[in-house]
Image (tube, rainbow, N blue to C red):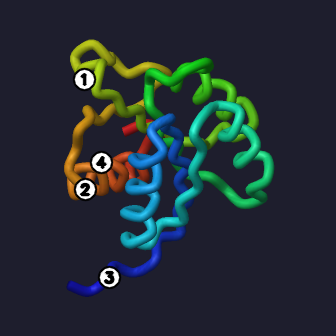
Amino acid sequence: KQNPPPSPHTILVVDDDAALCRFICLLLTQYGYTALHALNADDAHQVSNRHSGEINLLLVDIAMAGTSGPQLAQELQSTRPNLRLLFMSGLVTEKNFQGVLGGSFIHKPFSPSALVDKIQSVLTGKSLHA
């Protein structure tokens, strides 16, 4: 299987599960995305502040110790207003999610192809949140 062409998109992955965070970043890199990662909200702010380019998508766990995913998303959008949002959770269902901050949702566990398809749909959506 050939690798897809590089994507111009940068994705910030935030999850307090380090193994899952590394796996997602590896997967995204294989699909040509630039993947940044953080294990908590403080790390995410540092990564965002250090990254001079655009961050197109925040892929964030809803339930993390300390700052929640939706709270982090709101904070990051204050400095990156074009940041698209994709929330993930194994605890919350899509039915209960109801478009927090207008973001999209994917339920854990997910297959690599389901995650990539969801990311592509969010990034290519006409609005900020697909």
Identity of the amino acid at label 1? Glu
Q: CA distance from mark 4 to mark 2?
A: 10 Å
> In the rendered image, which quarter is residue 104 located in?
top left
Q: CA distance from mark 1 to mark 3?
A: 31 Å
Marked residue nearer the N-terminal end (4 or 2) = 2
**Quarter of the image with the C terminus in it:** top left
Identity of the amino acid at label 2? Pro
Marked residue nearer the N-terminal end (1 or 2) = 1
* Secondary element type, mark 3: loop
Query: Residue placed farthest to the top in the image?
Result: 96
Marked residue nearer the N-terminal end (4 or 1) = 1
Residue picked out by circle 2? 112
For the point 66% across and 40% down, the residue is 44
Residue picked out by circle 3? 3
**Quarter of the image with the N terminus in it:** bottom left
Residue picked out by circle 1? 94
Q: Is residue 87 left or right of residue 67?
A: left
Q: Residues within 10 Å of mark 4 (few under 14, many from 20)?
A: some
